[in-house]
Image (spheres, rainbow, N blue to C red):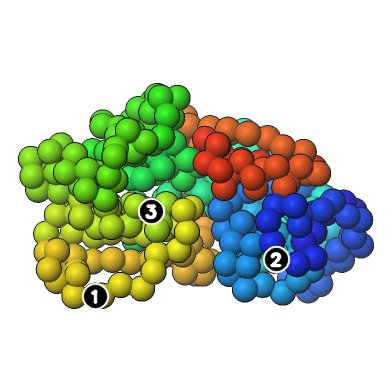
């Protein structure tokens, strides 16, 4: 089978299309012939060495496709079933992927594989952030960086559905339109600010009557963390869920005291879907919302599997909107 492999950590150019042996399922496993593969920012951390990994490496932790082989002890999944997955394991940038049967999420007949792949990790992440890490309530206000990204557009819709008001940040007019279309009440173009760290909190507090937001969702990281923290109201929370601009350096916890007894958390989806019942709940929630049209899934770019390096370059360059997919 064809697969994308990195022999060593590095820039996107280390991603090469190679032929590898097709996987064989062991007990409790299935092999899935991929139809759509999700590209996520964590894949760039794995490839670049931000997160230490063993090489050679086949990146990717989510996708959707059709089961082509089933191992022993798998009564609930059969050859021909359509499934999606989002796991802590890598290996999804390939024509065939080995998936634990317990992690294989049934895809409804009326949900296509592209949407299923887009929702497996990013959809459940957005769901976790609004109904798990924080349980948003009507009347709350949130700040969201990268509002036109894959998680951002989904999170905005879920937050609005929960009754919250969303203030988002974006870089361009096109992204502002997308963010507003997802339901953002206010959109701030950070590229128009001379001093992001000072001006973004000032603008947010102006929009919240001087109070600040109940929750700041920050998926950008190093470049926006201080501004996000300064935008949170007394006893509010900052949820750091990504580092598109780099990792946040260690900081003095006394800052939380001085800023108003704030809370900061750095969640990962895998800790919110480790329980099989919780996994089924989160997947079922986002799949159902997509099927009814309550959640609009925007596929921003589709790249052939062979162009995985170009997909990474676009993602790291903040050139993408919505979900980025690889198509075998």
Q: Do callouts 1 and 3 mark residues in contact (Cβ within 8 Å)? A: no
User: Badge 1 local density, few (<14 within 10 Å), some, or many (20+)?
Assistant: few
The residue identified by callout 3 is 223
Mark 3 is surrounded, within 10 Å at the Cα level, by few (under 14), some (14 to 19) or many (20 or more) other residues, namely: some
Q: Is residue 120 left or right of residue 137?
A: right
Q: Earlier in the sequence, mark 3 or mark 2?
A: 2
Q: Nearest the camera: 58 or 99?
A: 58
Q: Residue at x 24, y 75 (%)?
A: 253
Residue displayed at 19% across by 69% down: 256
Q: CA distance from mark 1 to mark 2?
A: 32 Å
Q: Position of residue 73 (x, y in %)?
A: 76, 71
Q: CA distance from mark 1 to mark 3?
A: 19 Å
In front: 57, or 132? 57
Q: Position of residue 152 (x, y in %)?
A: 42, 42
Q: Which mark is residue 253?
A: 1
Instruction: Please name the residue shown 73% across and 46% down the image.
Output: 308
Label 1, secondary structure: give it: loop
Q: Position of residue 197 (x, y in %)?
A: 26, 50
Left or right: residue 244 compared with residue 207: right
Q: Is residue 95 visible?
A: yes
From the viewer's perspective, is residue 146 above or below residue 176?
below
User: Considering depth in this image, is 85 or 255 the residue closer to the camera?
Assistant: 255
| Mark 1 or 2, nearer chain start | 2
Q: Which mark is residue 9?
A: 2
Where is the C terminus found, in terms of image quarters?
A: top right
Q: How many marks are shown on the rendered structure?
A: 3
């Amino acid at each position: 089978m064809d697969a994308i492999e990195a022999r060593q950590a590095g820039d996107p150019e280390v991603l090469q299309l190679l032929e590898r042996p097709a996987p064989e399922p062991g007990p409790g496993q299935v092999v899935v012939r991929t139809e759509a593969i999700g590209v996520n920012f964590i894949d760039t951390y794995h490839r670049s060495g931000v997160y230490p990994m063993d090489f050679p490496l086949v990146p990717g932790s989510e996708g959707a496709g059709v089961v082509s082989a089933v191992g022993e002890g798998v009564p609930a999944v059969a050859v021909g079933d359509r499934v999606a997955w989002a796991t802590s394991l890598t290996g999804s940038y390939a024509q065939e992927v080995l998936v634990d049967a317990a992690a294989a999420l049934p895809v409804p007949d009326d949900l296509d594989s592209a949407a299923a792949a887009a929702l497996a990790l990013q959809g459940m992440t957005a769901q976790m952030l609004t109904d798990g890490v924080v349980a948003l309530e009507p009347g709350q206000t949130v700040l969201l960086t990268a509002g036109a990204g894959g998680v951002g557009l989904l999170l905005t819709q879920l937050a609005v559905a929960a009754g919250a008001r969303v203030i988002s940040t974006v870089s361009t007019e096109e992204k502002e339109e997308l963010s507003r279309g997802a339901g953002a009440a206010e959109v701030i173009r950070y590229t128009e600010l001379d001093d992001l760290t000072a001006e973004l909190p000032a603008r947010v507090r102006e929009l919240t009557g001087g109070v600040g937001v109940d929750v700041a969702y920050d998926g950008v990281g190093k470049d926006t963390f201080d501004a996000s923290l300064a935008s949170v109201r007394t006893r509010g929370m900052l949820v750091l869920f990504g580092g598109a601009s780099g990792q946040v350096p260690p900081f003095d916890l006394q800052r939380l005291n001085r800023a108003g007894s704030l809370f900061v958390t750095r969640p990962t989806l895998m800790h919110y879907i480790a329980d099989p019942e919780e996994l089924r709940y989160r997947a079922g929630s986002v799949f159902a919302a997509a099927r009814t049209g309550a959640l609009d899934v925007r596929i921003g770019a589709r790249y052939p599997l062979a162009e995985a390096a170009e997909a990474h370059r676009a993602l790291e360059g903040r050139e993408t909107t919505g979900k980025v997919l690889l198509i075998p």
